[in-house]
């Protein structure tokens, strides 16, 4: 799972000096807004940069006819294009549609998988920041630890992310603290890049100091990655909570109900680490498109290998019930042990099997399922145009 997030080296982020926020900072604190934890979804934005390796890879993985129903609602087809469909550049209008979809479903925030500002996977983030509609939805960042570099050669990406935290709609929790996910943490990479837990802890402390020097509250850092390692070491590394990008098993297969049992067992296991746990809600896990047509960043994947390992897609009720259980799991804990948020995998991991966004032509069942839980209201008889 670690390697699938490591996009080919040629697409490494072009890093820039610290960003000037496009909004003046204004408190957008989570406290007292809602009695339940805030609920957000991961955005993995490979879809918006035609001609880039990530966008071409997902076009290829979803091109077989049996997988086209998974394609995002904005996919385009043309009689003059030999490909079944293509994904156009992100536009202000398309971003505003996605914001309205998320708000309709009741989401409180998006967690953008974060790269450098000039990376093709960052186009949606910067379109979101520029949108006037973004005031209706908050956001935070979910970052691969490897993108922080190493003890001897740290990157400037953390400083760039601190600049983003000053945005008015950057998600703040637990006393105005910017929420930040630091993920895909593995013991081997910590030893290799940071010379052990103490080295990573030192870098996290520097990150916190840089944020407070920039006028921000101390970031609320959620550590995600190797579950057994984090249960032992997350407190020593200096995290505020633990969580997961996705919760599944490598050779897992079966019903969606079986996938939810895997995920919910993961919440409980992480809680043995004596830090609050951000529970990850799964919307599916079915990598068959990537197994048939491997993507370039999953270098160990051989075509067809493991094609039998997938979980069936959820019904609306199954998805809603899984989310309800996550909310109940958090609120049943003592206040001191509660995480302020719940995370959903994912808004748009369509070719990997986890998505909420409408699919072709405008299938919104998953948004409807969330709305019933998060807004405690049925879908209106005259549903707004979402696509």
Image (spheres, rainbow, N blue to C red):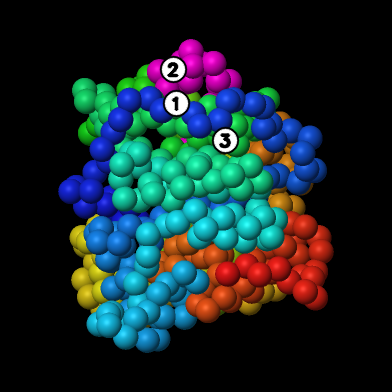
- Alpha-carbon distance for marks 1 and 3? 14 Å
Residue drawn at point x = 35 percent, y = 51 percent: 121
Front residue of this view, candidates 278 and 136: 136
Q: Which residue is label 1 attached to?
A: 20
Report helix, strand or loop for mark 1: loop
Q: Viewer-nearest of labels 1 and 3?
A: 1
Q: Which mark is residue 170?
A: 3
Query: Which residue in the protein does label 2 denote?
Result: 210
Q: Is residue 341 toward the left or the right of residue 203 in the image? A: right
Q: Nearer the viewer, residue 127 or 38?
A: 127
Q: Which residues are magenta?
A: 206-228
Q: Position of residue 284 (x, y in %)?
A: 51, 68
Left or right: 53 with respect to 128?
left
Residue 268 appearing in the image: no
Asked if residue 108 is among those painted magenta in the image, a careful observer would answer: no
Question: How far apart are labels 1 and 2 at the CA level?
Answer: 15 Å
Task: In the rendered structure, find residue 130 and report the number of the disc placed on it.
Answer: none
């Amino acid at each position: 799972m670690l390697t699938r997030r490591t996009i080919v080296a040629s697409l490494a982020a072009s890093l820039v000096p610290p960003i000037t926020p496009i909004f003046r900072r204004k408190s957008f604190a989570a406290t007292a807004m809602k009695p339940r934890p805030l609920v957000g979804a991961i955005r993995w934005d490979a879809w918006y940069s035609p001609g880039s390796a990530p966008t071409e890879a997902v076009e290829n993985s979803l091109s077989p006819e049996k997988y086209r129903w998974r394609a995002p609602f904005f996919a385009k087809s043309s009689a003059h294009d030999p490909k079944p469909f293509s994904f156009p550049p992100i536009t202000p209008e398309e971003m505003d549609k996605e914001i309205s979809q998320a708000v309709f479903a009741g989401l409180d925030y998006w967690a953008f998988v974060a790269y450098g500002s000039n990376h093709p996977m960052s186009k949606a983030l910067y379109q979101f920041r520029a949108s006037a509609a973004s005031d209706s939805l908050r956001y935070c960042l979910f970052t691969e630890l490897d993108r922080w570099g190493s003890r001897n050669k740290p990157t400037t990406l953390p400083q760039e992310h601190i600049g983003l935290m000053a945005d008015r709609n950057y998600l703040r929790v637990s006393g105005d603290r910017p929420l930040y996910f630091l993920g895909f943490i593995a013991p081997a990479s910590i030893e290799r890049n940071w010379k052990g837990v103490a080295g990573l802890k030192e870098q996290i402390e520097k990150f916190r100091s840089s944020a407070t020097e920039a006028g921000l509250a101390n970031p609320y850092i959620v550590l995600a990655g190797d579950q057994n390692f984090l249960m032992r070491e997350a407190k020593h590394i200096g995290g505020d909570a633990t969580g997961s990008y996705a919760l599944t098993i490598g050779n897992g297969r079966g019903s969606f109900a079986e996938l939810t049992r895997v995920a919910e067992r993961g919440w409980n296991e992480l809680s043995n680490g004596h830090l609050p746990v951000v529970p990850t809600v799964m919307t599916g896990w079915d990598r068959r498109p990537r197994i048939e047509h491997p993507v370039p960043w999953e270098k160990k994947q051989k075509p067809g290998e493991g094609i039998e390992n997938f979980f069936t897609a959820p019904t609306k009720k199954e998805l809603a019930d899984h989310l309800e259980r996550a909310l109940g799991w958090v609120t049943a804990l003592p206040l001191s042990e509660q995480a302020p948020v719940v995370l959903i995998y994912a808004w748009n991991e369509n070719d990997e099997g986890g998505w909420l966004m409408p699919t072709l032509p405008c299938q919104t069942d998953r948004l409807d399922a969330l709305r019933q839980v998060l807004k405690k209201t049925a879908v209106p008889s005259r549903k707004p145009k979402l696509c």
